[in-house]
Image (cartoon, helix red, strand yellow):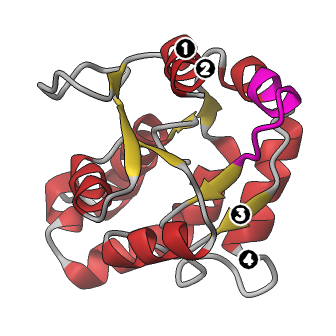
Amino acid sequence: MDDTICRTTEIVHDRLEAYSSSLGINPLDIMNDEELCKNFFCIYREDIYEHAEIKRNVASVLKRLRSKGNEIYIVTAREDDFVSSHTTAEEITRKWLEENHIEIDGIITDVYGEKRAKAIKENHIDIMIDNDPYNYKMMTSEGIRCILFDDRERYVLKENYVTNWFDVEKYIERIR
């Protein structure tokens, strides 16, 4: 979800700058202090989730893939620890997806690393698209087909690496 379907890093940086400025401290001090970091996300996580910008071509590619019989599941580390008590991470995510015209078949929240691999296997998900090299390595080491999505071209990888959603679509069509 985050930095794969929507641009989360940018909005986190914006909110972090505002928060650190209001406290009169460096943004790195917040991220390097467990309590300050937790407070930051308690205050801003819901805002970040609701206002993240959709990545280019996501909605149209996912719509075409779904129209060809593919099921689309969101598998995300988003969790409820940092959202308000009256709204869950899943509800916020579902609302954002609807507002951005992204149709899905399900959402699996609060999964990262080994928990993510387990959830993918339990839900019989064929292909994972992830922007995190740690998750990519975890998935592939567990025998899960994974595409590393990196539209910022930060990583050096030759296989299963894409930089845009049209390439995701081509890859999936090629293996189907």
Q: Which residue is located at x 73 percent, y 87 percent? A: 85
Image: 35 above or below 17:
below
Badge 4 amino acid: Thr
In this picture, which residue range is highlighted in magenta?
A: 63-72
Q: Which mark is residue 88?
A: 4
Q: Position of residue 44 (x, y in %)?
A: 54, 62
N-terminal-most mark, 4 or 3: 4
N-terminal-most mark, 2 or 4: 4
Badge 1 amino acid: Lys
N-terminal-most mark, 2 or 3: 3
Of 17 and 109, the residue lying toward us: 109
Q: Contact, CB < 8 Å: mark 2 with mark 1?
A: yes
Of tags 1 and 4, the one toward the viewer is: 1
Of tags 2 and 3, the one toward the viewer is: 2
**Residue of label 1:** 170
Badge 2 amino acid: Glu
Q: Which residue is located at x 32 percent, y 29 percent? A: 160
